[in-house]
Every structure is written in C-alpha cells, then in structure tokens.
Image: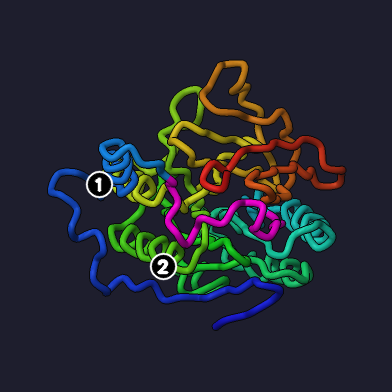
Amino acid sequence: MSRKRSGYRSDFLVPAYASRSPLSDWPAGHGGPQPNRRRWLAACAAGGAACVLRPHCLQASSAELQPLEFLVVSDTHLGYGGSDRAERQWEQTSAELADAPGEVVFHLGDVVDRRREEQYAIYRKYRDRIGKPVHEVPGNHDPQPLFARHIRDPIDTVVELHWLRFVLLGNAHTDSHDGFLEDKQIRWLDEQCRSARKSGKYVIVCMHVPAHSNRHPDRGWYVRPGHGHRRLYALLEHHADCVLALFHGHFHNGIRGWEDHGALHEICFPSALYNQNRRLEVQQAPGYNLNEFRPGFTQVAIKNGELWLRYKPVRAPVSLSRKQSLKPLS
C-alpha cells in the first residue's frame, strides 16, 4: 500500500528477508563491513586529494534540502493501571498532535500497557482524529502478533518524507526490557540504507529499545552484543554518510540522548503518559537529558543541516528545545 502527500510516502514493505545478504562479504570475525569511508580516507591520504565523505548522490548542500517538520510521540501505555487515565491523556495528546506543526507522526512503541489487546481499538479511535499519517513501532508491551493484527503488518517498514527515509524496526520482546535485532533485520536495514543512498536520501532508524549501551546511572536496557549490537553499529558505521540518527522510546526520561558514536545522534523521546527525573546530568551521565519531565511529545525540525528538538508538554506550551548539528548534512 502506498500513500502520497506533499512528498510524504509510506511504503508498507514486506522485508526482503529471503533475499541475498549484502553483508555476506563481511570478513570472518570482523562483526561487520569494512567501512568504505576508511578506505576512501586512506586513499585520499596517500594521494593528497581533498575528501568529501558523502557519496555523489548526497553531495547537495544542506541549504538545498527542503526543511522538514514531523512529530514524535512514545509510550502511551493505554490501559495503564487498569484505569482510563492513559486513554484520557492520549485523547488530549492526539488533539495537540493534530494542531502541532509536522507532516507525519512517529510513535516509538508501547502503544498499550501490558499486552491489553482491547486497548488498541481505543488507541486507534483517537489516532484517527489526528488527521496526519501516524506510524508506530511495537514496544515491549506490544506483542508483535497483536501489533500486526491491530496496527500494521508487516511490522518492519519504510516511511519517506521528501529526502528523508525513516526505517521502522520492531526490536522489542514482551519478556524483556532489552532489545533484539535478528540477522535478517540487519540485512534488510542494510538494503534500505543502500537503496536510500542510490536515490539521494538520508536515513533515520526508529526502534523502541535503544541500541546504545547505556550504563549506570542510566537504565541499562539496550540491544546487547549477542542480540545484534555489534552488527548494527558496524552497519551504521558503514553507512555513516547517510544515517543521521537512531530514534527510540522506552526510557520515560524525557529527551535523553548520546553523541558518542561519531556523527550519529541517538535519542530517546519522552513518554506522553509519564516521565521520571533520574538526575542523570547531576550524576554526570554521558550525553544529555533535558530538564523537562512532564508528559509530552516532541516537535522535530530539520533545516540548514541542524536538528531541532522542541519538547511539547501536554496541556502546556513548548518548554525547552535543543539544536544539534547533523554533520553528514553540514
């Protein structure tokens, strides 16, 4: 199925899991592809040539790229506590998403709470009032069979907004707070990045559970080495000139982010139902955690090579914002 709207396109793609693996030529024991940019830098250093790290199809300056606006919400947990509190909160949140600037909405998981199947219909009732395309990934409270039945099948899919491709991956299991990426998902992600580069697009990857190996004082929930961590980061390094960011929910810590994997931005977005102040910046945790923890969503804009995050508490105006340089675009 395909929908078009002002350069927006949603392709509900059946992942090409059975196709040949573009990673089949990885050296044994390496854990991932040898990054093209390293070979390129070495060649440039040997020849004294100037290097541009973007492939030819992505060499347009950021000023030539159309500004984008979209919205990110997460962890609505409908049915939380066995009451209608989460429903009332989602009703208000959806009304504010309808009025907020942005062409499309991304929901980063935990649509319902504790596998409550009857809550999906309630979620969809208010989602359909937003009047904008909404695309979800399942969280650890969303069993994938139920998500496929009530939200979308297939689960892993692609959404395109002008020059930006969003790759949505289901990486959560209901029996764990950690994340899991299968080899077939890594291969499919590689295919999506390769085809994006060929068509002159950049990529943002959306998953519920972060890949970042956050440690104390953070929560420590992530995609562990034995569950796809190494292969994912090797792949992201290989495509460092076109992958801009990893987007996640799951943490309930407001806007929490890291910038310690080169130019890659890794961001956990706030819950629309509840967030907790874990005093991460006071404890000098790596990265950043904006000092805003009210339930809310995020208005995101990309313009002139910069990523803008604007925290929108529910029932209140935008409170805090953060600007980040998207180095592949600069």
At horizontal 42% and vertical 56% (from top left) the residue drawn is 55
For residue 66, side relative to residue 166 (left or right): right
Q: Earlier in the sequence, mark 2 or mark 1?
A: 1
Crowdedness near tag 2: few (<14), some (14–19) or many (≥20) residues, C-alpha within 10 Å: few
- Specify the farthest residue to the bottom: 1
At horizontal 82% and vertical 42% (from top left) the residue drawn is 318
Residue 324 image position (x, y, % from top left): 63, 38
Residue 34's mark?
1
Q: Which amino acid does label 1 sit on?
A: Gln
Taking depth in this image into account, of 232 and 192 the one nearest to the observer is: 192
For residue 279, side relative to residue 19 (left or right): right
Taking depth in this image into account, of 90 and 175 the one nearest to the observer is: 90
Location of residue 40 (image quadrant): top left
Q: What element carries label 2?
A: helix
For residue 318, side relative to residue 124 (left or right): right
At horizontal 24% and vertical 59% (from top left) the residue drawn is 23
Q: In this view, does 130 lie above or below 319?
A: below
Location of residue 109 (image quadrant): bottom right
| Residue span colored magenta | 52-71
**Pointer 2 and pointer 1: residues touching (CB < 8 Å)?**
no
Q: Which amino acid does label 2 sit on?
A: Ser
Quadrant assignment for the N terminus: bottom right
